[in-house]
Amino acid sequence: MSSFAGVDLCPPCAGSACETSADCGYHLLVVQDYSRAKEKAPTGESIISRPFRVGCHTWQIELFPNGDNPSCADFVSLYVCRLDDYLNNAVDAKFSLSFVDQAEKQKPVYILGTETCSFPHGGSRGHRKFMRKDALERSENMRRDGFTVRCDIMICCEEDDASGTGPPRYICQHFSTLLESKVGADVTFEVSGETFAAHRCVLAARSTVFMAQLFGPMKEGTTSSVIRIEDMEAKVFRALLRFIYTDSFPEMEKECVREEAQDVEQGQEEDEMHLQWLRGLFTAADRYDLQHLKFICEKRLSEDIGVSSVASTLVLAEQHDCSGLKMACFKFIQAQSSSCLKRVMSTNGWGHLMTTYPSILNEVIAKLASKKRKKHST
């Protein structure tokens, strides 16, 4: 297609936020004549940027105007792809995909806080549901039937995690081996009927809550050989342990890599299961004071807000005092049409929101009124 243009912008790292352990840069995909592109490109067909270089590797941005599979046909799908086969090795990198005006998502500190993803040759990572098409078309990002997407990439070194929030990689690899082999495990958890063997020192080193529970004032309550956790799903606790031991977002390969759904119904079911799992992991991260994991979950939940989920996500944000996630929900609601707002208000989550957190309802009304005033003033 001729409805796009690519711009290479790969400046050197500057300031303390970018260390010499990472090569970084960004690329702009300028999409023009969006209406025509959306009309002409069926679901599964993409717009691609020109290849660009970051960290001795070749990359490309891939945008699907009508989603990359039927389960997300109402969304724009967006990915970054690695094209080269340099040394035939996978490349570990952090990345952020955003609209060009979203300055907060382009700051080095934001990118440093995202999870590290592995990019094999030809591998792609990104978002099946980057943004609803109708929300995009009404947003300030759309200008003269076009918009600009920015892809920031930071290549991680082999020795250390570029975020500076986790242990060196060789330690993570050692911890991962411990988790798999269970050698030296000295504490057992029983979570929703499933048992997990772990190492007290590893848990305490990563979480102040585990430190207090296993070695501090809370230790008196953990004298039993088995610590039971009844209010958490086993798959969530498994993911929590995986993050603690490896400092990588759990189930990363499964969740980050684009997968084709067999049909729309199956895709929707998978999306709902993933959303529930992500909410549980967000709650667990807050409970055990794992701020890096909580930040990653917050980011993913913010990107996965929909008509059916926004009210429940607002409740979750309020329960865990997460202002960033709360603001993402408000922005989503403000961008909806009247018909979409009616659908939001008909969900079970909205009813729970009204009865349990009426103060949030007042904030929603204030946000909508502010949007209306701005619309009339222009």
Image (cartoon, helix red, strand yellow):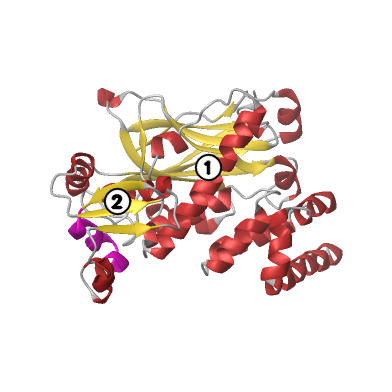
Q: Quadrant of the C terminus?
A: bottom right
Label number found at residue 274 = 1
- Please name the residue shown 69% across and 48% down the image: 308
Left or right of 26 on screen, residue 305: right
Q: Position of residue 339 (x, y in %)?
A: 84, 49
Q: Position of residue 84 (x, y in %)?
A: 36, 25
Left or right of 158 on screen, residue 48: right
Q: Position of residue 13 (x, y in %)?
A: 34, 52
Label 1: how many residues lie within 10 Å, few (<14), some (14-19) or many (20+)?
Answer: few
Q: Main secondary structure of the magenta part?
A: helix
Which of the two labelled residues, at mark 2 and mark 1, occupies the earlier sequence position?
A: 2
> Would you say the residues marked 2 and 1 are in contact, meaning their CB atoms lie under 8 Å apart?
no
Q: Quadrant of the N terminus?
A: top right
Magenta residues (range)? 199-210
Label number found at residue 195 = none
The outermost residue toward the bottom is 217
Residue 201 visible at all: yes
